[in-house]
Image (cartoon, coloured by chain):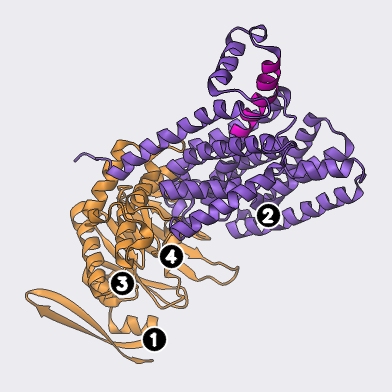
Amino acid sequence: MVYRATATENKKAILLLVLIVIPVLAAPICIGIGRYSLSVGESIKVLFNAAVFGKESVEPQSYSVIIGLRLPRIILALFAGAGLAVSGASFQALFGNPLATPDTMGVAAGASFGAALALLIGDNLIWIQSVSLIVGLIAVFLTYSISRIKGRATIIMMVLSGIVIATMFQAFVSLVKYMADPEDKLPAITYWLMGSLTGITYKSLLIGLPFLIVGITIILLLRWKLNVLSLSEDEAHSMGVNVRKMRLFIVLASTMITASAISMCGQVGWVGLVIPHIARMIFGSNNRFIIPASISLGAVFMILIDTIARSATQGEIPVSILTATVGAPFFIYLLKRTGGAWV
Amino acid sequence: MIFKVDNGCFSYTEGREILKNISFEIKDGNVLSVLGPNGAGKTTLLKCMIGLLKWNRGASLLDGKNISDIPVRKLWQKIAYVPQAKNSVFAYTTEEMVLLGRSAHIGTISQPSKQDYEKAEMAMMDVGIAHLRGKECSRISGGELQMVLIARALTAEPSILVLDEPESNLDFKNQLIILEKLKELSMNKGIAVVFNTHYPSHALKISDKSLIMKKDGLCLFGETKKVINCINMRDSFSVNVHIEELEICDVKHYLVVPLSIV
């Protein structure tokens, strides 16, 4: 007997291919949008010339805007969006709970506190990034060790201790804000917490991106087993999966992603929740499709949001405001249309 | 294949053993039914037996080898477990769900191969649910879901199939479908089937061996037709029963009628 893919499975494969192409198309379109505006063709020409013939072959102004300012932002948006979406999707599978996001483990609160603290002391981006990443990892470590009782960490204990740790770190953030100089430090911290991709440089990308790439790759590789992990613990165990080890791997990967995304662009909420759900509406529940779809949709979503953030008004609009104001109505529309039938 | 439990003891809280010195043995093609009152530890026994819970003392042996010494993936290629049917939070389609049963044969970072898909489809045909393909597990009936879970267990190509109350919560017809399927699997494929049940007559219908659990943690093990008798049922369930053998169209049927509480 020969297995034949059904029509829906073939359709899914085609859709997935389309999804992978979209970010590749979105990037050169969005890079040309802004106060200094270029067409898609011109943007590609600038990118191509700069890459092949070097800096001198491109007009200085184009070079500084496209290569110096916008390209690193686009790269960050691509990876941060993909990462946040994928870590949301993996947490949802891991906890068997469609509402779980990396915030659940206290990562976001920890990383935010780290960043706020670093901002209080200095304003070097790389310094902020490192402290934020370290505190984010400490937060997840605390959550994990609190939830371990008699050597076993149950899901419910993990969620509960995650809430406790998050609350604690949120209080620390408030404390930092309270102590900060209201003239210059407080606005800087507040603005940073609202999320922004401004000021990203290649140097700081070099520090943060590897964490994102490694985390995304780990989850991508484990994507089919995520289905098994989303079942009850006994079931997962009885399918030959080392539940404890796999959980640890995925939690670590997601933490790395979240902490380094937050350390580079502040607290960007919502992506980890809304993107995996959109992916589920299109592809059903199989993580074999959900994970790659989340990567692609998350990347596109972030590029679009950041493009709006930097070009819609004279100043910059904080990213978290946009993800919520654009994301929420869109999500409501989808909920109403489908009646939440995909979960 | 010989699967043996040797003097298994288990307690959730120290000092209160709910399973005491459990011993039994099954071979290829055997059907073992586990009976016992609510709270006697039927599910616990199944979980201990296959290593989902650890025996405090004693051991489970697969072909003479302690199962805790067998590598996880190897072990679960031999044993398949069907828990009490409960739906997943996520709406997997039936064929996605069945395919998950191949997990023990698929490497950690691998994707299922074409062969795995074929085996999943074969298992669905085997248990007669090929028509459910493409449907979501959340939108099928309880009986159909149970068949999906059995198909999922079969894709692992196990030597032992362990089921936790596979036929409870099902209607007459679905109960018969499940029971006949289990018998057929043991006879045609030589799979050893272990299941626990609330129905003595189901045990008499398909099993060769039975294990009756008692509230004090001890158990009785033996040939089904010998072990399930009025005295043992009274001992274990505190219910007086009458057991009737009927022969209808040359087939023997057993009726277990509860008479009164002891």
In magenta segment, residue A287:
no
Residue A241 location in percent, x, y? Answer: 47, 46
**Image point 24% across, 40% down: which residue?**
A3
Task: Give how far apart the Cα atoms at labels 3 and 2 are.
Answer: 39 Å
Task: Give how far apart the Cα atoms at labels 3 and 1 are.
Answer: 25 Å
Task: Give how far apart the Cα atoms at labels 2 and 1 are.
Answer: 47 Å
Q: Same subunit under labels 4 and 2?
A: no
Please say whether residue B208 is visible from this viewpoint: no
Colour used to depict chain A in the structure image: purple
Q: In this rendering, would A56 be left or right of A244? A: right
Residue B212 location in percent, x, y? Answer: 36, 73
The chain coloured orange in the image: B
Residue range corresponding to the magenta coloring = A61-78
**Image point 71% across, 44% down: which residue?**
A267
| Nearest to the observer: residue B146 or residue B61 | B146
Image position of A7 with respect to B250: above or below? above
Q: Please name the amino acid that badge 1 sits on.
A: Ser
Residue marked by disc 4: B45
Upstream in sequence: badge 3 or badge 1: 3
In magenta segment, residue A70:
yes
Residue B242 location in percent, x, y? Answer: 25, 87
Tag in front: 4 or 3: 3
Image position of B57 with respect to A28: above or below? below
Q: Please name the amino acid that badge 4 sits on.
A: Leu
